[in-house]
Image (cartoon, helix red, strand yellow):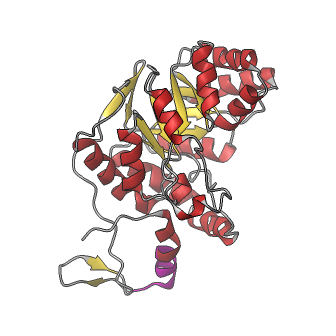
């Protein structure tokens, strides 16, 4: 039976690979490691269904940029960052992007302020013929408006297909009551004629955008339930503290919604997280993936969507 790979499997499988454990054929013909772990399952056949934001068509599953940038949520496991840095080499990152594209994921979110990420994405496109679309964001401090505008222009010049405002600074602006400043940043993005989004971890950010009619085209907002062990630890492990309130509010929002952190940084199995997000109104799922997670995640999203989920919100894209 196929077993879904979670981020917790990463350490287990990496140790097996680095030790050079021999693969053997099991009784059912499936490849198995010496410790009995099955090889990653193949994805469901067929392209991933798409939605549309403006003129941009986007696969319902989008590749997250954190792991591509070698950033991950490690809770209190300090050694994991070094492990990720050693595993996700430039070659492995390019392999992951190409694999995702080959399996139907056509869009990635990316911090194009990072020279590394910019270099790798441009290599994928310009040297290897990749077609992956970029939803780009800047990490230039929002209060540095001139620098932010210049960085946005550079992202557009580099080939961004859509733009968004990074979530944590948006949350901070709203907490400080700086709605006009947030609106001005959205206008900078919109001036380039590309679809643009406001990102958020906190529901009041989305509520403020709706109340003040900030003219973004879509939202990138966290969504996950709290039924996982490390939620009790509350240490780099909770990304959506108002899940039901978010679900209830988003029912009335007509703009498309891309949900992220649906697996709570790896604590929730993909099928559980994807199903929860889709059934509760998300139009797209943004998920970070190592190369070995791409195939099962594509299979899962196709199966979840094919099951004709009973949604409490109309598709908005």
From which residue to which does the magenta span run?
A: 13-21
Please name the residue shown 57% across and 66% down the image: 87
Q: Is residue 131 visible?
A: no
Q: Position of residue 160 (x, y in %)?
A: 55, 29
Residue 217 falls left or right of residue 151 = left
Q: Is residue 147 above or below residue 13?
A: above
Q: Nearer the viewer, residue 204 or 187?
A: 204
Farthest right residue in view: 144
Does the segment drawn in magenta span residue 19?
A: yes
Q: Nearer the viewer, residue 17 or 316?
A: 316
Please name the residue shown 61% across and 61% down the image: 232
Q: Is residue 307 above or below residue 70?
A: above
What is the quadrant of residue 189 in the picture?
Answer: top right
Q: Position of residue 236 (x, y in %)?
A: 66, 56
Q: Is residue 185 above or below residue 139?
A: above
Does the segment drawn in magenta span residue 85?
A: no
Residue 135 falls left or right of residue 40 = right
Farthest left residue in view: 28
Q: Main secondary structure of the magenta part?
A: helix
Q: Position of residue 137 (x, y in %)?
A: 63, 33
Which quadrant is the N terminus positioned in? bottom left
Please name the residue shown 30% across and 53% down the image: 299
Q: Position of residue 84 (x, y in %)?
A: 60, 64
What is the quadrant of residue 35 in the picture?
Answer: bottom left
């Amino acid at each position: 039976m196929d077993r879904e790979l979670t981020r917790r499997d990463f350490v287990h499988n990496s140790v097996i690979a680095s030790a050079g454990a021999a693969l053997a054929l099991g009784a059912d013909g499936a490849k198995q490691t010496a410790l009995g772990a099955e090889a990653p399952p193949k994805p469901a056949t067929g392209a991933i269904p798409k939605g549309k934001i403006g003129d941009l068509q986007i696969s319902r599953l989008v590749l997250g940029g954190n792991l591509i940038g070698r950033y991950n949520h490690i809770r209190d496991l300090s050694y994991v960052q070094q492990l990720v840095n050693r595993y996700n080499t430039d070659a492995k990152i390019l392999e992951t992007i190409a694999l995702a594209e080959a399996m139907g994921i056509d869009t990635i979110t990316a911090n194009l302020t990072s020279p590394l990420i910019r270099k790798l994405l441009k290599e994928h496109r310009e040297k290897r013929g990749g077609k992956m679309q970029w939803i780009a964001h800047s990490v230039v401090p929002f209060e540095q408006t001139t620098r932010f505008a210049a960085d946005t222009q550079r992202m557009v010049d580099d080939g961004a297909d859509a733009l968004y405002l990074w979530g944590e600074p948006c949350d901070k602006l709203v907490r400080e009551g700086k709605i006009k400043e947030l609106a001005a940043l959205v206008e900078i993005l919109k001036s380039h004629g590309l679809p643009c989004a406001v990102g958020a971890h906190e529901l009041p950010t989305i509520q403020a955008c709706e109340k003040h009619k900030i003219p973004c085209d879509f939202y990138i907002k966290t969504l996950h339930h709290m039924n996982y062990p490390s939620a009790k630890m509350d240490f780099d492990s909770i990304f959506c503290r108002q899940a039901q309130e978010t679900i209830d509010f988003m029912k009335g929002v007509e703009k498309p919604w891309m949900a992220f952190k649906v697996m709570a940084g790896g604590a929730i199995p993909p099928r559980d997280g994807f199903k929860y997000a889709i059934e509760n109104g998300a139009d797209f799922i943004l998920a970070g993936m190592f190369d070995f997670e791409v195939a099962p995640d594509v299979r899962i999203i196709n199966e979840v969507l094919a099951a004709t989920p009973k949604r409490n919100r109309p598709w908005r894209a």
